[in-house]
């Protein structure tokens, strides 16, 4: 489809060609292109010259820079000057000699070489429109619009004059002094300049969607063609003398009035019907808009008062498109920072062990239907080294098609207090049961421990001095063990008064060394070789030193009981594992069956003849309090490995 600027150039080129042909025809004395129709008025040399300037002015109107604007002003001024000079000659009866200045007209009897009054008037209007089209302001826009509209009207009337003149016996019409191609050129110029400035021309009036423009489009054909048809009939009946002129004019008026009334009524009915439909639509839209505004207001209030943080994730640019409120502005988790943040930038705020959970939620949402809802619980860092629990509920929010999710929404709620309460209730129940059992066991153990202690002391007195020196280490082990058991019983009796772990920065290697020292008697008696693969001072973790030592001692004691005496080996090593330190304690003992591994940390479960099944359950509880994961890998006759993951303290 041809562009508007290209069409304007074609129109200006058409006028330019017409003007050049006429100029050439005057110079070559080629009369056909001067008047087109035999006996019709001719286009004068000065007229062709002004059309040449006008076509250049129209062409320069398509350009926006200052040079062409000044060219428009110059050409417009020249056109106005020559056209007004011609009009002054008609009005004042003066001949300034400009009509035959460039070429002498020998064909015209009245005013040779002078353009018609209507032609000069149209040139004056076009020159004015050419200048005003480059100026700003409402007044200049109106000047352009009305000037071009008058030119178009005059040229249409001139064209109709030529059509009706074929049926008239005498030249009685007002615009028959304008040549046909003059009228055509003016119409082209007015159309071209209107296209240059559609908002300042009759083009906008006729092409708009307003009621007035629709009315103009419907009435314009009627206003042109009905009078033309009736005029043809009137000319015919008067030329054939079928009716006298007075009766013909009367019939012309009656027919015009009747057709005018019917046509206007039909147009009014159509427009009223359209306007009625428009009003209904406006009322419907107004009601819908009110409902929409109310819905939006309700949703805004709901979002503002929601206890949840609402986030919309856009998957096309992998960013947070919307968040309704701050999570923690003090640590860079404010609304303004998070909105627009890349998804990957959020992960450092998520606990390292929960990041995989969050990634799984993201993957599941990509494969979800519109009705699927996914729930997870993760920990977020809110201050210092403290992590708090949050529930996250996800759902598809917007999708491109059934296979492509554009956005999903997350509802994030802080449940740390709820989790803490649940944990306290579980601990209370668990330690209530364990406390009752502990009191029973402690009561039963007091007497045997006292007997062992007394028997050890008596044996020490009865054994001879030579033997006493040989058995010195064993008597010391018995004495220390009795004291340790007595202390353990005391701890069991007070275990019902549970106190939570107090975590602070400790070196994991130091805790292991201290634990090995506390289990040294058992290790010595079993003849176990310890292989340590770690360095002190390199593994900072958050820990309750005393409780973590209890857990590690329990694991070491279990390992010493699982190996063959004097053949046992225990390897202890610490490795870097992404965001964790991995502590591994491996032995070469008898190993475990898979069903034993599944129950290993259950309370009161044991595979020992003399065990009570509280040691490893205690280990599990202590590890949970340290937010540390523990795993057991073992096969029968291939030993066992306890792996514990401790979160690193971030620098």
Image (spheres, rainbow, N blue to C red):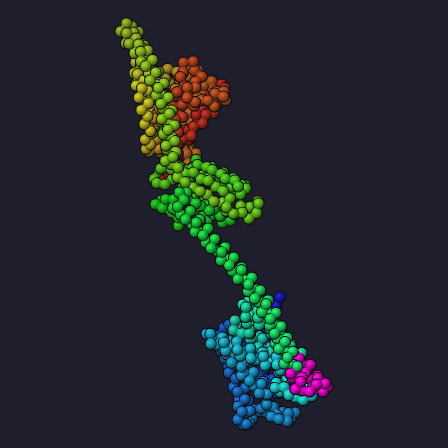
Task: Give yes or no for residue 246 being in the magenta stretch.
Answer: yes
At x 51%, y 77%, the residue is 144
Q: Which residues are magenta?
A: 230-250
Q: Is residue 30 depicted above or below 475 in this figure?
A: below
Please state the horizontal and vertical placement of residue 483, each as a whole percent of the image.
Answer: 30, 16
Q: Is residue 324 depicted above or below 256 in this figure?
A: above
Please state the horizontal and vertical placement of residue 451, each as a whole percent of the image.
Answer: 30, 9
Q: Is the stretch drawn in magenta largely helix, strand or loop? A: helix
The quadrant of the rendering that contains the N terminus is bottom right
Q: Nearer the viewer, residue 222 or 343?
A: 222
The quadrant of the rendering that contains the C terminus is top left
Task: Give yes or no for residue 322 being in the magenta stretch.
Answer: no
Q: Nearer the viewer, residue 15 or 280?
A: 280
At x 59%, y 87%, the residue is 116
At x 57%, y 70%, the residue is 215
Whether residue 348 can be seen here: no
Whether residue 426 can be seen here: yes
Q: Nearer the viewer, residue 256 or 142?
A: 256
């Amino acid at each position: 489809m041809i562009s508007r600027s290209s069409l304007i150039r074609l129109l200006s080129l058409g006028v330019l060609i017409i003007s050049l042909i006429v100029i050439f025809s005057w110079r070559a004395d080629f009369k056909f292109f001067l008047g087109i129709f035999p006996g019709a008025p001719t286009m004068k040399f000065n007229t062709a010259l002004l059309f040449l300037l006008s076509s250049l002015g129209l062409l320069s109107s398509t350009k926006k820079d200052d040079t062409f604007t000044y060219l428009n002003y110059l050409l417009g001024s020249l056109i106005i000057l020559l056209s007004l000079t011609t009009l002054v000659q008609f009005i004042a009866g003066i001949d300034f000699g400009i009509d035959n200045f460039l070429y002498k007209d020998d064909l015209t009897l009245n005013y040779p070489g002078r353009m018609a009054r209507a032609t000069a008037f149209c040139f004056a209007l076009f020159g004015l429109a050419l200048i005003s089209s480059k100026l700003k302001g409402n007044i200049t826009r109106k000047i352009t619009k009305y000037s071009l509209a008058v030119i178009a009207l005059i040229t249409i009337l001139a064209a109709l004059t030529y059509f009706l003149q074929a049926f008239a016996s005498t030249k009685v019409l007002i615009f028959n002094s304008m040549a046909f191609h003059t009228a055509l050129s003016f119409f082209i110029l007015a159309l071209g300049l209107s296209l240059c400035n559609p908002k300042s021309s009759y083009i906008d009036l006729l092409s708009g969607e307003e009621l007035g423009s629709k009315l103009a489009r419907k009435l314009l054909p009627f206003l042109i063609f009905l009078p033309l048809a009736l005029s043809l009939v009137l000319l015919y009946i008067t030329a054939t003398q079928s009716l006298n002129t007075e009766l013909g004019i009367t019939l012309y008026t009656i027919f015009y009035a009747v057709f005018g009334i019917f046509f206007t009524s039909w147009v009014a009915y159509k427009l009223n019907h359209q306007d009625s439909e428009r009003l209904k639509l406006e009322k419907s839209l107004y009601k819908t808009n009110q409902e929409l505004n109310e819905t939006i207001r309700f949703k805004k209030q709901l979002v503002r008062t929601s206890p949840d943080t609402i986030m919309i994730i856009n998957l096309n640019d992998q960013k947070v498109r919307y968040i309704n409120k701050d999570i923690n502005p003090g640590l860079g988790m404010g609304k303004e920072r998070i909105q627009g943040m890349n998804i990957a930038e959020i992960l450092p705020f998520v606990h390292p062990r929960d990041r995989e959970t969050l990634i799984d939620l993201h993957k599941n949402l990509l494969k979800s239907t519109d009705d699927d809802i996914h729930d997870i619980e993760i920990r977020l860092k809110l201050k210092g080294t403290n992590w708090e629990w949050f529930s996250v509920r996800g759902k598809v929010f917007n999708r491109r098609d059934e296979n492509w999710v554009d956005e999903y929404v997350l509802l994030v709620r802080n449940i740390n207090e709820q989790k803490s309460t649940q944990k306290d209730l579980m601990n209370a129940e668990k330690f209530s049961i364990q406390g009752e059992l502990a009191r029973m066991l402690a009561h039963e153990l007091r007497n045997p421990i006292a007997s062992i202690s007394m028997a050890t002391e008596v044996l020490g007195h009865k054994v001879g001095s030579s033997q006493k020196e040989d058995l010195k280490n064993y008597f010391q082990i018995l004495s220390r063990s009795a004291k340790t058991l007595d202390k353990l019983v005391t701890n069991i009796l007070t275990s019902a008064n549970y106190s939570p772990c107090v975590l602070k920065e400790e070196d994991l290697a130091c805790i292991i060394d201290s634990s090995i020292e506390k289990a040294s008697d058992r290790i010595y008696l079993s003849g176990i070789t310890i292989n340590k693969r770690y360095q002190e001072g390199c593994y900072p973790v958050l820990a309750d030193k005393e409780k973590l030592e209890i857990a590690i001692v329990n694991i070491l004691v279990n390992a010493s009981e699982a190996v063959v005496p004097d053949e046992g080996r225990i390897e202890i090593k610490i490795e870097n594992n992404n965001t964790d330190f991995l502590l591994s304690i491996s032995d070469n003992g008898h190993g475990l069956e898979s069903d034993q591994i599944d129950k290993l940390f259950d309370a009161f479960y044991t595979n020992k003849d003399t065990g009570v099944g509280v040691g490893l359950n205690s280990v599990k509880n202590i590890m949970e309090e340290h937010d540390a994961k523990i795993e057991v890998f073992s096969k029968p006759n291939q030993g066992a490995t306890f792996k514990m993951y401790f979160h690193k303290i971030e620098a």
